[in-house]
Image (spheres, rainbow, N blue to C red):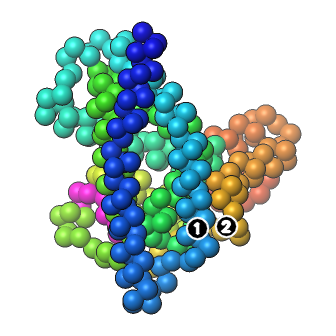
């Protein structure tokens, strides 16, 4: 049984749609860079771009083992599911999985912003002060270690790992095109229903009104339903990056720097309760300083 699970998991990873989409990603990146160069738009910074490529390389290497283990766990959950004989590859199940996967992504992504230990793994995707298709490839490194656990409940619901990983890949491919300033707004109906470059620019903003907003993958309706939606406004242009930006282009520092900062904060504490809060509360909480969590800043800002 274990040998079959390992073999099936490896087969899924070898046929990941994201790998086949990489040439399209690189073509879009080249096109965006050419547009920025011809129009003299400050969309790219040489050192920042190469830092993004370095972080991408780290992610590709580090992601292999957690993804393999995650898919194997999905197979174990699927084998234990009482619904696996009911759910199949018929269109209605794919449609249901689309919504469940998108809601799972929203929950996972929101948790990455509201739990500091998870934020440490996600922050590399946000600590660039530039917004382009290079930033899209600058994925969180540490978050790969826990990401796939969030999708295992879908396997318990009877969806087999092939379907789950395929839908995860479709979502990730969709999200690539969101990372650009060269597309302004889509038609109103599209902006209301789907995640768009405008909505995702907000997500990457360090402005107080934009902090921790628009966590959507494909559908923006989850943010509208759960109160985390914010519109991009011309009155307040998006400032990309963090509320306290980093001053390094070293890929390892970009990828793992927040973990080191958490360790420093833990050393400042004397109570175990505060240590737990540093790990589980949102970024910005301090046991002896000003509360700079996004919700606190937003209340003070309004």
Towards the viewer: 223 or 17: 17
Using the image as rendered, state which of residue 39 and residue 241 is in the foreground. Answer: 39
In the depicted structure, whether residue 97 falls above or below residue 51:
above
Q: Quadrant of residue 206 in the image?
A: bottom right
Say if mark 1 contacts mark 2, CB within 8 Å.
Answer: yes
User: Residue 16: x, y in percent?
Assistant: 36, 40
Q: Is residue 1 above or below residue 281?
A: above
Residue mark closest to the camera, 1 vs 2 = 1
Mark 2, residues whose alpha carbon is within 10 Å: few (<14), some, or many (≥20)?
some
Q: Quadrant of residue 46?
A: bottom right
Q: What percent of the width, then of the height, locates residue 245? A: 66, 68
The residue lying at 40 percent from left, 72 percent from top is 30
| Residue 163 relative to residue 238: left or right | left
Specify which label sits upstream in the sequence, 1 or 2: 1
Height in image: 245 above or below 118? below
Residue assigned mark 1: 50
Viewer-nearest residue: 159 or 214: 159
Over which residues does the magenta segment extend?
192-199
On-image quarter of the N terminus:
top left
Q: Is residue 220 visible?
A: no
**Residue at image mark 2:** 249
Outermost residue to the top? 1
Q: Which mark is residue 212?
A: none
């Amino acid at each position: 049984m274990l040998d079959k699970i390992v073999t099936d998991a490896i087969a899924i990873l070898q046929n990941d749609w994201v790998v086949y989409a990489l040439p399209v990603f690189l073509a879009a990146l080249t096109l965006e860079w050419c547009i920025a160069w011809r129009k003299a738009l400050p969309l790219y910074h040489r050192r920042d771009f190469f830092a993004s490529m370095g972080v991408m390389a780290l992610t590709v290497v580090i992601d292999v083992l957690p993804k393999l283990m995650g898919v194997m766990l999905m197979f174990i959950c699927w084998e234990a599911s009482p619904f696996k004989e009911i759910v199949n590859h018929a269109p209605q199940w794919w449609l249901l999985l689309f919504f469940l996967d998108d809601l799972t992504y929203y929950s996972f992504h929101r948790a990455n912003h509201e739990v500091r230990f998870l934020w440490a793994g996600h922050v590399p995707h946000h600590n660039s002060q530039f917004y382009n298709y290079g930033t899209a490839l600058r994925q969180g490194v540490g978050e790969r270690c826990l990401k796939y656990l969030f999708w295992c409940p879908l396997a318990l619901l009877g969806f087999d790992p092939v379907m789950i990983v395929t839908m995860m890949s479709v979502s990730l491919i969709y999200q690539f095109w969101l990372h650009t300033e060269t597309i302004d707004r889509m038609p109103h109906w599209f902006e209301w229903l789907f995640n768009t470059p405008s909505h995702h620019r907000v997500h990457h903003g360090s402005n107080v009104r934009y902090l921790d907003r628009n966590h959507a993958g494909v559908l923006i309706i989850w943010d509208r339903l759960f109160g985390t939606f914010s519109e991009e406004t011309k009155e307040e242009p998006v400032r990309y990056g963090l509320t306290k930006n980093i001053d390094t282009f070293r890929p390892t520092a970009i990828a793992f720097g927040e973990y080191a900062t958490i360790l420093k904060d833990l050393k400042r504490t004397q109570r175990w309760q505060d240590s737990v809060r540093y790990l589980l509360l949102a970024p910005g909480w301090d046991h002896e300083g000003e509360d700079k969590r996004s919700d606190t800043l937003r209340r003070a800002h309004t």
